[in-house]
Image: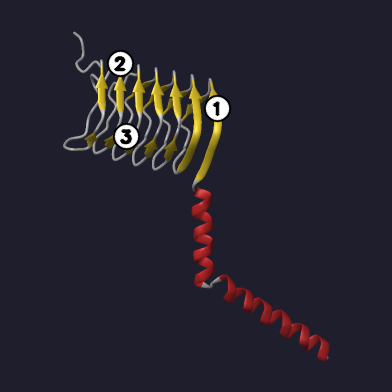
Amino acid sequence: MFTNTFILFFLISSSLFGYVFETNPINNKIDQFKKQLLDTRTISNKIFRDQVFNKKDFKNYKFEKVEFIHCNFNATNFRNSKFNKVVFKNCTIYNSDFRLTLIKFSKFIKSEIKVSYFNNAKLHFIDFIYSKLPGTSFVQATLHNCRFIKSDLSSAIWPNGEKCMKGSFEKCIYLQKR
């Protein structure tokens, strides 16, 4: 009888302890932190060649030393992502969302960025070389030390005020030819 009572007491106390342990606010914060870490994914030191990213969700990703060569992005979500030393070469980017992104030391070379959104993005030391940006919005974006070299900016939508700092526009097309 003693053994059965002890086992029953042990099972009840274990389940109560487990319940209290699981509902502990500290453990909830740890679980939230783990979820946040999982939500921020990192892609680094990769080369993507001839890939199609159709409606791909890269929200909250971190891209470090990544190259996209001859890639197509259609309705791709990069919202709230971070880019450092990323190169887009000969890419087509259409209807993609770069809002709230941080892009540093990156390049868009011979790429076409059509009807995409960089609203509220922060761009630092970005080169747009031989690129086209028809219908691309930079509303409320911060452009710091960005260079636009021989690029078609004719229908891009630009930020107002002092948000373009120390940039350069070399041999670019500003107005649509009729």
Circle 1/circle 2 CB separation < 8 Å = no
Residue holding disc 2: 150
Among the two numbered marks 1 and 2 on one chain, the one whose residue lies closer to the N terminus: 1
Q: Is residue 178 above or below residue 70?
A: above
Circle 3/circle 1 CB separation < 8 Å = no
| Label of residue 118 in the image | 3
User: Which quadrant of the structure image shows residue 109?
Assistant: top left
**In this figure, what is the number of numbered marks?**
3
> Where's the C terminus, which quadrant?
top left
- Could you say where residue 39 lies in the image, as x and y percent from the top left? 50, 48
Please name the amino acid that badge 1 sits on. Answer: Ile
Residue holding disc 1: 47
Q: Nearer the viewer, residue 38 or 125?
A: 125
- Could you say where residue 141 lies in the image, as x and y percent from the top left? 27, 37
Q: Label 1's element?
A: strand
Q: Taking 69 as reference, is 118 left or right?
A: left
